[in-house]
Image (tube, helix red, strand yellow):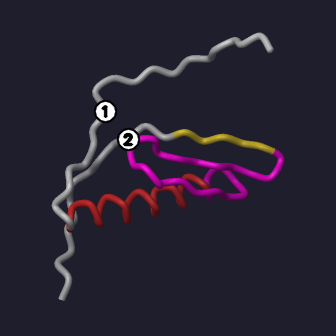
Amino acid sequence: MKKRIMGKIFEFPVIIERDECGYFASCPLLQGCYTQGETYEEVLENLKDAMRLHIRDRLEAKEEIPSVQNIALTTVRVRA
């Protein structure tokens, strides 16, 4: 029987983008955690599910869970 690990709350920065097809979301600190959805709410719930599974797998494998120390969001102007 698999032991369920519950209780700890993790907080990660996420990126949510919108285009003509809907929404795309990812968590840069958890490689491979990305999803899509038709609405903002749907993509956010889908991402939470993906992150939850990713974290549980890492905890069960006794792998380190990354944490963010400092984050900045900015835009960059590039002339083509």
Q: Quadrant of residue 34?
A: bottom right
At label 2, the amino acid type is: Phe
The 10 Å Cα crowd at callout 1, few under 14, some 14 to 19, many 20 or more, is: few
Write the residue at 51% across / 56% down.
Answer: 47
Q: Which residue is mark 1?
A: 68
Sequence-wise first label, 1 or 2: 2
Report x, y in % for residue 23: 69, 49
Residue 73 in the image: state x and y as whole percent. 51, 21
Relative depth, front residue between 13 and 7: 13
Q: Which quarter shows the N terminus?
A: bottom left
Q: Does 31 lie within the magenta span? A: yes
Secondary structure of the residue carrying tag 1 is loop
Q: Nearer the viewer, residue 60 or 12?
A: 60
Q: Quadrant of residue 79?
A: top right
Q: Is residue 44 above or below residue 15?
A: below
Question: Residue furthest toward the bottom?
Answer: 1
Do the CB atoms of the residues marked 1 and 2 lie less than 8 Å apart? yes
Left/right placement of residue 38 relative to residue 61 reads right
Question: Residue at (43%, 37%) from the top-left corner?
Answer: 13
SS at circle 2: loop
| Residue 78 painted magenta | no
> To which residue does mark 2 refer?
12
Residue at 63 percent of width and 14 percent of height: 76
Q: Is residue 18 above or below residue 21?
A: above
Q: Which residues are magenta?
A: 20-42
Report the quarter where the C terminus lies: top right
Q: Amino acid at mark 1?
A: Val
Q: Furthest-right residue in view?
A: 20
Front-most of 3 and 45? 3
At which x and y percent is residue 32?
47, 54
